Image (cartoon, rainbow, N blue to C red):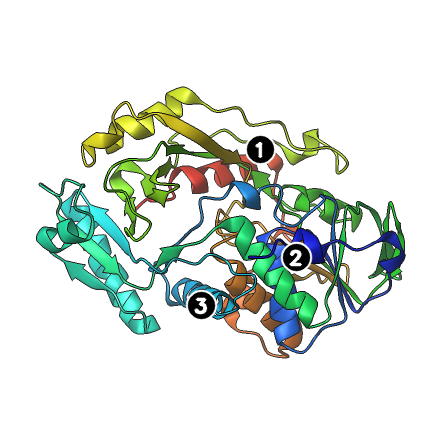
């Protein structure tokens, strides 16, 4: 399988004008480029300051993709991502390493079981096949897990997981074939704004004119928006998971799982167990405290938090207790005060388009986010849902950073809230 390094890098001489310039080469930026190219817009330059795609937040993703959601719009968004991962997987050269193993959503209370019944109703409306299965059927799917006392299990056969870096590489490979250009190792320094409209970007390797700038800069999306004169509440919140040493019986074809009462999720990984969770007291950082030219604060493994994940999960999977860890994934996914993406063109600065605030759905939702962005800028009458994601909801209303950070943290902390 090829590495994106062999085809994604371009020299400084290839920094040139484009119709669309995408800032950020993570899963979202690459997914947006792919979606635009699929829509026939191939005069695209993607700018990434790292030496390869998916090197920052995307590289630390757990890689799960779950489709059952609380609304039809969000469910169909996830379904589109799955369809896209299947399409990318068909290419024999560069694949997203998509494993369509299904997922088990496990309820430990009657209240949660009722939520699962509602999720199934929404899934039916969206055209997503799901099934409420009994504990014996769940045990056959995950033999080493203990299902005694479990109140309900929602099974979605078309869920799965992928390798985040491979997803971005697969997007980039297909984009390159459609004419998209990649400026890797290139840092954006400022935006060129003329008469209230974005006209180009200035980088450490030269300038380029464009019709639209698309901000997919992840934990630096706040700073890119500031270059356009926009203040947006994009809050990086810490997220962690661990991977254990190989365990007997953990094979790559086991389903992903989610246990909302324990705020845990996981999947097989590297012969062992990947286990992550949503912390009841989150740690966040203020994007105003670091500059565009610098990285967010380093995330050190928080072992008391990680050990709490293990302790909680041991009731369902005793092998997790005391398991040796080989790797800790951690990063700063960005959250918004209302828990919705920020997608679309600003009415204040024409040509400046947002693709950020992904609320930990950047990798799994990358294709769907790309589809929403295409609708927002190419469809003369985008849906009400797409219009509700506009950056204007923050630039045209009053808000303050203290409240925004508290609300964004609450979105993270109540991720599995009923």
Judged from the image, the secondary structure of the residue bearing numbered disc 2 is strand
Question: Which of the two discs, 2 and 3, labels the residue nearer the N terminus?
Answer: 3
* Nearest-to-viewer mark from 2 and 3: 3
Q: Residues within 10 Å of mark 3 (few under 14, many from 20)?
A: some
Judged from the image, the secondary structure of the residue bearing numbered disc 1 is helix
Please indicate whether residue 149 sits to the left or right of residue 275 in the image.
left
State the residue in front, 357 or 392: 357
Image mark for residue 86:
3
Could you tell me which residue is drawn at 27 percent across and 71 percent down?
Answer: 124
Percent across and percent down for residue 71 are 37, 63
| Residue under pointer 1 | 402
Question: Residue 38's quadrant in the figure?
Answer: bottom right
* CA distance separating discs 1 and 3: 42 Å
| Residue under pointer 2 | 354
Is there any visible trace of residue 314 in the rendered image? no
State the residue in front, 200 or 400: 200
Question: Which of the two discs, 2 and 1, labels the residue nearer the N terminus?
Answer: 2
């Amino acid at each position: 399988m090829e590495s994106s390094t062999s085809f994604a890098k371009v020299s400084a001489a290839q920094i040139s004008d484009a119709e669309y310039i995408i800032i950020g080469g993570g899963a979202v930026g690459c997914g947006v480029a792919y979606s635009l190219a699929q829509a026939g817009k191939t005069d695209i330059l993607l700018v990434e300051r790292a030496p390869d795609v998916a090197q920052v937040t995307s590289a630390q993703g757990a890689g799960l993709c779950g489709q059952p959601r609380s609304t039809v719009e969000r469910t169909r968004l996830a379904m589109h991502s799955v369809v896209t991962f299947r399409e990318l997987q068909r290419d024999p050269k560069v694949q997203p390493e998509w494993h369509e193993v299904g997922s088990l959503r496990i309820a430990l209370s009657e209240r949660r079981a009722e939520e699962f019944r509602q999720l199934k109703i929404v899934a039916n409306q969206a055209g997503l096949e799901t099934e409420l299965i009994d504990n014996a059927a769940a045990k056959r799917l995950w033999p080493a897990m203990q299902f005694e006392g479990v109140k309900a299990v929602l099974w979605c056969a078309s869920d799965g997981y992928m390798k985040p870096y491979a997803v971005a590489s697969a997007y980039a490979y297909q984009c390159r074939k459609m004419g998209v250009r990649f400026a890797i190792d290139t840092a954006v320094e400022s935006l060129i704004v003329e008469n209230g409209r974005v006209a180009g970007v200035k980088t450490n390797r030269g300038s380029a004119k464009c019709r639209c700038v698309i901000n997919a800069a992840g934990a630096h999306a706040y700073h890119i928006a500031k270059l356009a004169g926009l203040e947006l509440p994009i809050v990086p919140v810490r997220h962690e998971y661990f991977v254990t040493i190989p365990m007997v019986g953990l094979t790559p074809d086991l389903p992903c799982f989610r246990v909302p009462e324990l705020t845990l999720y996981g999947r097989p990984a590297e012969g062992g167990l990947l286990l992550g969770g949503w912390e009841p007291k989150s740690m966040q950082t203020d994007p105003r405290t670091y500059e565009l030219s610098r990285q967010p604060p380093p995330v050190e493994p928080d072992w008391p938090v990680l050990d709490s994940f293990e302790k909680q999960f041991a009731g369902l999977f005793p092998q997790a207790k005391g398991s040796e860890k080989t790797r800790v994934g951690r990063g700063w996914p960005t959250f918004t005060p209302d828990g919705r993406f920020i997608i679309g063109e600003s009415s204040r600065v024409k040509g400046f388009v947002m693709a950020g605030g992904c609320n930990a759905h950047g990798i799994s939702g990358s294709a769907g986010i790309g589809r929403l962005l295409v609708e927002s800028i190419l469809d003369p009458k985008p849906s009400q849902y797409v219009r509700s994601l506009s950056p204007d909801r923050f630039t045209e209303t009053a808000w303050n950073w203290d409240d925004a950070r508290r609300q964004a943290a609450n979105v993270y902390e109540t991720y599995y809230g009923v």
